Amino acid sequence: MLGIQRVIRRTEHERLPWLSNIVRRVQPLHDVDNAEPQTTRDNFFTAARFYCVETICAPCGVVIAWTKFAKSESPTNILNFLERVFPTAELRPNYICIDKACAVLRTAYANGSWDRIWKHTTRFIVDSYHYINHRTTDYLCRTMCNPAPLNGSAPNLVVVELDNNNNPHYKRAFNTQACEQLNAWIGGFQTVLNKMTPTNFDWYMHSLIFLHTERVILKQQERRGGMQDDEDNNESEGEDKDEGEGEDDTEYEGFEVDRDEVDDNIDVVE
């Protein structure tokens, strides 16, 4: 076991005769700008591969769009993809959640697309899973891309909820891990997808996303049905009680949020 751990910890520059000479591609950090890689090929006996699949999901899990990135998941590629999916101001969501939102925001500032497209409609935020790994010294990331600010700057991102003892606490208003959950599910088909031609890959991905969206919508309908049954039961129990009994005039101050509006105006990109 110790030998296996030692091999895993070896760097790419530490080469021994009995080790493989394959140079593996390292995933760059999410909050570091990475340029388009200039890859070279020694031969053409193997088929070229796309770098990754990029998806856009609603917080509920419904997939809005997807595409393939040929060489890298660069901020420029992400911005171009978003511009194709949301060409007009009416279609753009209030928030777009990306694992490298701070890098995307810097690129948008640099190439002028922030003032030209996104400034008046959309804000880029980092999903909660990747945000904890971003640098705390990055002022832009901490102030502009915080997924749950508690200073009141983004009341639609944080809501107040009561626990079982009626104590108020802050809670994220929506799920920022929709794309991560989708990727985990699609990852189960990666072995099959890696062996497909581009045409078969596109068809298979469309089919997987269609089935995933159907399953998400079905769960939402079941959840709404259960909530409606609970409301009916509560109303019937309330009618049996005397008027004025058990009234609670306690008020809790906190952020107000329209959940329907949030679900319709936040997209998660991964």
Image: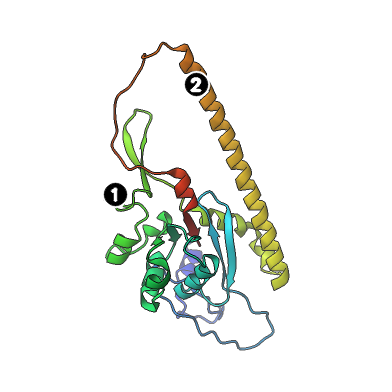
Q: Residue at x 54, y 60 (%)?
A: 56
Residue 105: give x, y in percent of width and height: 38, 69
**Colour mode of the rendering:** rainbow
Label 2 sits on a secondary structure element that is helix
The residue that disc 1 covers is 150
Q: Is residue 109 visible?
A: yes
Q: Amino acid at mark 1?
A: Leu
196 relative to 235, above or below: below
Q: Which residue is mark 2?
A: 235
Q: Which mark is residue 54?
A: none
Which numbered mark, 1 or 2, is in the foreground of this view? 2
Return the disc, 1 or 2, that comes first in the chain's sequence.
1
Q: Amino acid at mark 2?
A: Glu
Q: Is residue 32 visible?
A: no
Q: Quadrant of residue 196?
A: bottom right
Residue 265 vs residue 67, the one in the foreground: 265
Left-right relation of 94 to 220: left
User: Of 148 and 189, which appears nearest the observer?
Assistant: 148
Q: Secondary structure at mark 1?
A: loop
**Side of 165 relative to 235 (left or right):** left
Instruction: Answer left or right for 235 relative to 110.
Output: right
Q: Position of residue 53 (x, y in %)?
A: 58, 67
**Residue drawn at x 67%, y 55% as measured from the top left:** 210
Callout 1 environment at 10 Å: few (<14), some (14 to 19), or many (20+)? some
- Mark 1–mark 2 Cα distance, whole angstroms, equals 35 Å
Pick out the residue farthest to the bottom: 42
- Residue 23, given in percent of the width and then of the height, sits at 53, 79
Residue 94 placed where, x, y %? Answer: 42, 57
Q: Is residue 164 above or below residue 128?
A: above
Q: Nearer the viewer, residue 261 or 183?
A: 261
